[in-house]
Image (cartoon, helix red, strand yellow):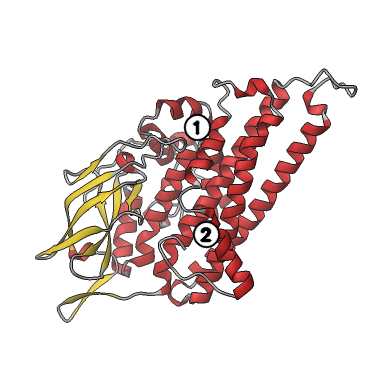
């Protein structure tokens, strides 16, 4: 597959020595976050496609974090990838989301493709540093696929397509007309058959290129239909439990994204409190600095403690994902279901804590911190917008059914 990607020479070298450990990659992500945070509010308000931001991810080496070492990737695991998403999200939630979705779709071949397809996609994507997007919103009608000789032709629309115009490769999903056969395929983004509407203008996560897309007769050879093999003249897909890990993976990405945004909110607010918040003068217990006031100290202590708790639960979920990845071909429905339950728990508390932090930081920064120029609102807006991706009440119910009825969630487009 021919994909147009930038060919800037020595861009990775400009960042200094290549990280050699997971800890160094996470530190690299923090450096990226620091750079993004400088003008995150201004870029959010401008609401322009984040081409430069994606180049920053590419040049820093984060795009190929999960890619095979032999092809120039870091060969890292999902624990590191999730912490990288968390770190980047602290600097800019939109770019953290783009990176998280990229990791999911870069991994999509491993979830559903044949060994030969996996090897081919990962080699090319890593060497050429593809940035992935996906037009797979399950709330819309499936794309319709027609067979024309040895090709599949995708047609339809999706109201959401994260990555949009800034992606090099786009994952499509559809159903072959007249059958119940779902097909995933990776296609070049820049082609006449893919037209992005540019209509993403939400309250938050404004730089995620998540607007609508029109797919008009995009052709894919049968050989590129992920996971399909030819048997007795027919194309057959052999299902396995690991095929269903795409949803738990994206849900744990969400939890880490919310956690990162909340981390950014608390850190930004703390800097403001230390440097600009004034103590309240109309009290018998007068303090010289806002950082000496009991209610300020108590609030930060409460919020920080809750974030540590979310972090512990989210990391526990990552352990379960790593255990599944270690034996992808023999994972059981119970293992998959138990991981999904813990991920559902992590996601709900990450949302609750993130929204609480996004609101309560104003109590300890003061009225002047509501100025548009300060931009503290971006953190609440980002979590509030994306957390509506699917109703959190259903995640609580998943955990409730597990506790009360010993029921594990069945795989679906949202569980």
Q: Is residue 43 visible?
A: yes
Most distant residue in the right direction: 284
* Label 2: which secondary element: helix
Q: Residue at x 63, y 31 (%)?
A: 268
Q: Is residue 68 left or right of residue 277?
A: left
Q: Is residue 26 left or right of residue 415?
A: right
Q: Residue at x 49, y 67 (%)?
A: 325
* Front in this rendered view, residue 255 or 140: 140
Mark 2 closeness class: few <14, some 14–19, many ≥20 residues within 10 Å:
some
Comes first in the chain, label 2 or label 1:
1
Q: Residue at x 55, y 46 (%)?
A: 258
x, y percent for residue 287: 85, 22
Which quadrant holds residue 7?
top left
Most distant residue in the top direction: 281
Q: Which residue is mark 2?
A: 394
Which numbered circle lies on residue 26?
none
Q: Which residue is mark 1?
A: 36
Which quadrant holds residue 398?
bottom right
x, y percent for residue 101: 42, 50
Q: Is residue 159 left or right of residue 275?
A: left
How far apart are labels 2 and 1 at the CA level?
33 Å
Which quadrant holds residue 142?
bottom left
Most distant residue in the bottom direction: 232
x, y percent for residue 338: 56, 70
* Front in this rendered view, residue 290 or 348: 348
The vertical placement of 290 against 185, above or below, is above
Q: Are marks 2 and 1 in contact (CB under 8 Å)?
A: no
The vertical placement of 287 against 294, above or below, is above
């Amino acid at each position: 597959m021919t994909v147009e990607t930038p060919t800037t020479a020595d861009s990775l070298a400009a960042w200094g020595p290549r990280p050699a450990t997971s800890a160094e990659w996470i530190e690299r992500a923090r450096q990226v976050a620091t750079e993004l945070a400088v003008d995150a509010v201004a870029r959010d308000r401008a609401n322009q496609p984040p081409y430069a931001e994606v180049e920053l991810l590419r040049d820093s080496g984060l795009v190929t974090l999960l890619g095979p070492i032999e092809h120039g990737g870091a060969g890292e695991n999902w624990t590191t990838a999730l912490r990288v998403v968390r770190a980047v999200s602290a600097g800019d939630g939109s770019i953290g989301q783009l990176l998280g979705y990229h990791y999911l779709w870069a991994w999509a071949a491993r979830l559903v493709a044949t060994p030969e397809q996996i090897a081919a996609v990962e080699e090319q994507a890593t060497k050429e540093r593809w940035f992935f997007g996906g037009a797979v919103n399950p709330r819309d009608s499936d794309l319709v696929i027609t067979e024309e000789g040895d090709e599949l032709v995708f047609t339809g629309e999706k109201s959401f397509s994260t990555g949009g115009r800034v992606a090099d490769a786009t994952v499509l999903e559809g159903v072959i007309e007249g059958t119940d056969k779902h097909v995933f395929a990776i296609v070049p983004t820049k082609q006449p058959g893919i037209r992005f509407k540019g209509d993403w203008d939400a309250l938050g996560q404004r730089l995620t290129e998540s607007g609508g897309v029109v797919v008009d007769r995009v052709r894919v050879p049968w050989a590129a239909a992920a996971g399909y093999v030819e048997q007795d003249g027919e194309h057959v897909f052999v299902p396995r439990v690991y095929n269903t890990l795409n949803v738990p993976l994206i849900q744990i990405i969400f939890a880490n994204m919310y956690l990162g945004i909340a981390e950014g909110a608390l850190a930004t607010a703390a800097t403001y409190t230390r440097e600009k918040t004034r103590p309240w003068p109309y009290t018998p217990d007068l303090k010289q600095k806002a950082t000496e006031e009991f209610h300020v100290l108590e609030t930060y202590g409460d919020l920080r403690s809750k974030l540590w708790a979310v972090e512990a639960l989210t990391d526990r979920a990552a352990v379960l994902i790593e255990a599944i990845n270690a034996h992808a071909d023999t994972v059981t429905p119970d293992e998959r279901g138990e991981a999904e339950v813990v991920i559902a728990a992590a996601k709900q508390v990450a949302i609750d804590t993130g929204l609480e932090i996004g609101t309560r930081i104003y109590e300890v920064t003061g009225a002047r911190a509501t100025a548009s120029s300060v931009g503290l609102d971006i953190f609440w807006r980002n979590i509030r917008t994306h957390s509506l991706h699917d109703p959190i009440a259903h995640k609580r119910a998943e955990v409730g059914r597990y506790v009360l009825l010993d029921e594990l969630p069945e795989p679906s487009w949202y569980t």
